Amino acid sequence: MNSSIDRRLSLEELDGQRWPEPAPDATSLVKAVHALRARPIGSLTVEELGRLIGQNVGVPFLLPLALEILRNTASAQAEGGFYDDDLLSAVLTVNPATWVRSPQFAQELNCIVASLRDVSPYIESDIQAFQRALPDDV
């Protein structure tokens, strides 16, 4: 995974794949994911990043952006109390093989979650599963 990705490019441009249009009866989630793949990744909102990562779409390109956002917001969230975040949950629950391929990102996420003090039980269980899946060298 590359941490210096051109944010002006879409996932379609970055991965070189243009998906066919979703079927007319496709769910709103499928339609949204298709549309988000065509947008520049730098224009995606936090919620949209979480949606894509949660659907395992574009993870190699979106994970560095998500970690940047989490790094920049975790300390303020920790000071404000209870932390329950969809983006954090999406990142914590990516395929564990991701952390083997990119231990630097695993280490960064581990530092981010270590800074959190009051998280929802759902996030806490995601954190525990993430930490159990970490490679030994992280």
Image (spheres, rainbow, N blue to C red):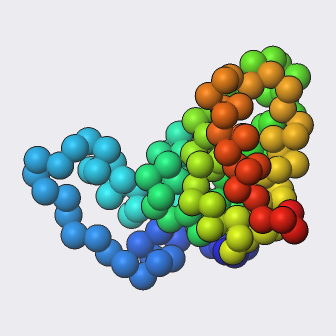
Q: Residue furthest bottom?
A: 16
Residue 49 coordinates in the image, percent (x, y): 54, 49
x 32%, y 58%: residue: 34
Q: Is residue 44 visible?
A: no
Q: Residue furthest left?
A: 24
Q: Tell me if residue 91 comes above or below residue 116 in the rendering.
A: below
x 84%, y 65%: residue: 136
Query: Quadrant where the C terminus lies?
Result: bottom right
Residue 90 is left or right of residue 13, and the answer is: right
Q: Quadrant of residue 73?
A: top right
65 or 93, which is in the foreground? Answer: 93
20 or 92, which is in the foreground? Answer: 92
Residue 6 coordinates in the image, percent (x, y): 63, 72
Report how many numbered discs are placed on residues in the image.
0
Q: Is residue 94 visible?
A: yes
Query: Quadrant where the N terminus lies?
Result: bottom right
Q: Tell me if residue 25 comes above or below residue 19 in the rendering.
A: above
Q: Quadrant of residue 127?
A: top right
Residue 28 is left or right of residue 101, and the answer is: left
Q: Residue furthest top?
A: 81
x 76%, y 59%: residue: 134
Residue 39 coordinates in the image, percent (x, y): 44, 60
Residue 120 coordinates in the image, percent (x, y): 68, 23
